[in-house]
């Protein structure tokens, strides 16, 4: 049966358009967030998130800086007509059907929003934070997602992120609390949670800076983002200066570091920008700030060792001398700024005299000596005795420790309970263990195998 409408005055119809929430949704990045995870949670995709957030241009999908606010786009849309079609009289059968369709559409949108919120609540880090915000404490014996969050914050290995708050997790937490100057009670409360979030943010900034430097493109004035904030922190700028924006103040700090650490001038290539060379120099000298607040331990220089990376294939000896003299000056509280192989190379270009370098930079009251240590006659008696007194030992041996073919110089810091030795290796700036057998059988250094020790008179 055909139903006709009564004549009426009409207004032109227009194409229906989606309606959205009054404001675009935003998300504040939490520890453990990834770009693909947020895209899934908010019903969008990674490319769309990057298009909406230009600050993500140089940030990897899995290294989002904690605290960064992101535009995640509008909520799922429902479609309605933009104008009234007419003032016609509809059939009594059609009106309920239209109302039911609109209601179903609204319910679907609400369900989609609820699902998105639920997925965001599962982002790593949020459960622990929510627990602490409720005034609860997390301690040994706890199990669940909150513990996994804690284990991730503490940087524990994936295999150790088992959701059980046992002795290993408590030990890692206590160590973190001591590092942050907190009471090492092994319990997560408000102060510890704040420190965990802050450390997570700093770690993300440093990672983003390292990733950007790895591209080989210098960071220039005018850039902004997490990588710039990491650069500002590395430059030693205070909290007020860590804005994430590379402006004139940050450029002045970069130029000062280049002038002080690298001897650069305004005519030098790369002046005023943060490239790999400037970054490496700042990393090498970072212990000026990082160890300034630690308590000096008189007579225990090995505990103050900080690993440095050599700048070229021939500076392993200079780097080793820098590590040892820095440790002695720190342990005795002389206030002398740490040095690097570049410092020593500038003092004596060409072949380095390690004895002279040690003499120039050891603090008053500390002397040094060196001994030949040829293969086949390598006694560990003196070395073990010095390490037992916490005196680091510089060692020069042959090829097994380097690809250069003429030997390598490094620092031994202590003897382990299994008979191996802790080694501070300038080749890559790493700290690792080396067996006694490897030391005994290593080939000869170009200048003969030897060891060098500094000790108090």
Image (tube, helix red, strand yellow):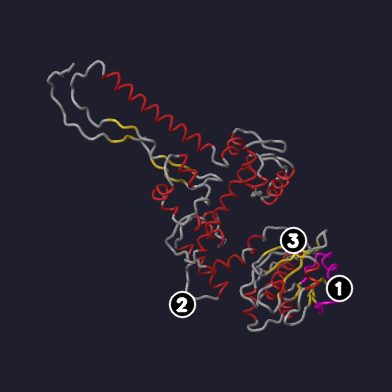
Real-space Cα separation, disc 1 to disc 3, in angstroms = 32 Å
**Which residue shows up at 74% across the image and 61% down it?**
296
What residue did someone put label 1 on?
379
Which tag, 3 or 2, sits closer to the chain's start?
2
Please say if the residues under marks 3 and 2 sit with CB atoms less than 8 Å apart: no
Would residue 368 appear left or right of 255 to someone viewing this image?
right
445 vs 12: above or below: below
Tag 2: Cα neighbours inside 10 Å, few (<14), some, or many (≥20)?
A: few
Real-space Cα separation, disc 2 to disc 1, in angstroms = 53 Å
Q: In front of the other: label 3 or label 2?
A: 2
Write the start and end of the magenta stretch as one range: 369-393
Would residue 24 appear left or right of 260 to someone viewing this image?
left
51 vs 74: above or below: below
The one of 450 and 201 positioned closer to us in this rendering: 450
Disc 3, SS: loop
Q: In front of the other: label 1 or label 3?
A: 1
**Which residue shows up at 57% across the image and 72% down it?**
260
Q: In front of the other: label 2 or label 1?
A: 1
What residue did someone put label 2 on?
267
Please identify the quadrant where the C terminus is shown.
bottom right
What residue did someone put label 3 on?
296
Tell whether position 387 is magenta: yes
The image shows residue 204 at horizontal and vertical percentages of: 55, 53
Please identify the quadrant where the N terminus is shown.
top left
**Which residue shows up at 54% across the image and 40% down it?**
123
């Amino acid at each position: 049966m055909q139903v006709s409408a009564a004549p009426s005055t009409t207004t032109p119809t227009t194409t229906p358009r989606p309606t959205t929430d009054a404001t675009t949704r935003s998300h504040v990045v939490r520890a453990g967030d990834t770009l693909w995870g947020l895209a899934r949670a908010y019903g969008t995709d990674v490319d769309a998130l990057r298009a909406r957030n230009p600050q993500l241009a140089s940030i990897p999908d899995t290294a989002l800086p904690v605290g960064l606010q992101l535009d995640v786009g509008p909520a799922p849309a429902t479609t309605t007509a933009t104008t009234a079609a007419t003032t016609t009289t509809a059939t009594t059968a059609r009106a309920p059907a239209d109302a039911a369709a609109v209601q179903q559409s609204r319910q679907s949108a609400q369900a989609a929003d609820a699902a998105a919120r639920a997925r965001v609540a599962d982002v790593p880090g949020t459960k622990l934070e929510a627990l602490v915000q409720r005034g609860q404490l997390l301690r040994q014996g706890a199990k669940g997602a909150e513990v996994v969050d804690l284990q991730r914050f503490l940087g524990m290995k994936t295999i150790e992120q088992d959701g059980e708050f046992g002795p290993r997790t408590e030990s890692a937490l206590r160590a973190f609390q001591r590092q942050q100057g907190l009471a090492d009670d092994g319990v997560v409360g408000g102060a510890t949670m704040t420190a965990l979030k802050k450390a997570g943010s700093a770690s993300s900034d440093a990672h983003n800076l390292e990733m950007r430097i790895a591209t080989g493109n210098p960071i220039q004035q005018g850039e902004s983002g997490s990588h710039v904030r990491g650069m500002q922190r590395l430059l030693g700028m205070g909290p007020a200066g860590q804005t994430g924006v590379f402006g004139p103040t940050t450029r002045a700090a970069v130029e000062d570091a280049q002038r002080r650490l690298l001897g650069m001038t305004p005519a030098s290539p790369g002046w005023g920008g943060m490239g790999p060379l400037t970054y490496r120099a700042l990393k090498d000298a970072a212990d000026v700030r990082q160890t300034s607040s630690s308590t000096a331990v008189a007579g225990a220089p090995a505990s103050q060792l900080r690993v440095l990376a050599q700048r070229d294939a021939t500076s392993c000896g200079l780097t080793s001398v820098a590590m040892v003299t820095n440790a002695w000056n720190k342990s005795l509280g002389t206030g002398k700024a740490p040095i690097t192989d570049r410092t020593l190379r500038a003092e004596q270009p060409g072949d380095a005299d390690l004895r002279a370098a040690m003499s120039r930079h050891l603090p008053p009251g500390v002397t040094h000596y060196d001994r030949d240590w040829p293969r086949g006659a390598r006694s560990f008696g003196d070395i073990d005795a010095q390490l037992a007194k916490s005196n680091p030992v510089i060692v020069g041996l042959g090829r097994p420790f380097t690809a250069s073919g003429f030997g390598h110089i490094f620092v031994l810091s202590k003897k382990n309970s299994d008979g191996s030795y802790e080694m501070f290796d300038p080749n890559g700036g790493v700290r690792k263990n080396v067996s006694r057998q490897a030391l005994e059988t290593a080939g000869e250094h170009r200048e003969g195998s030897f060891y060098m020790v500094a000790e108090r008179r």
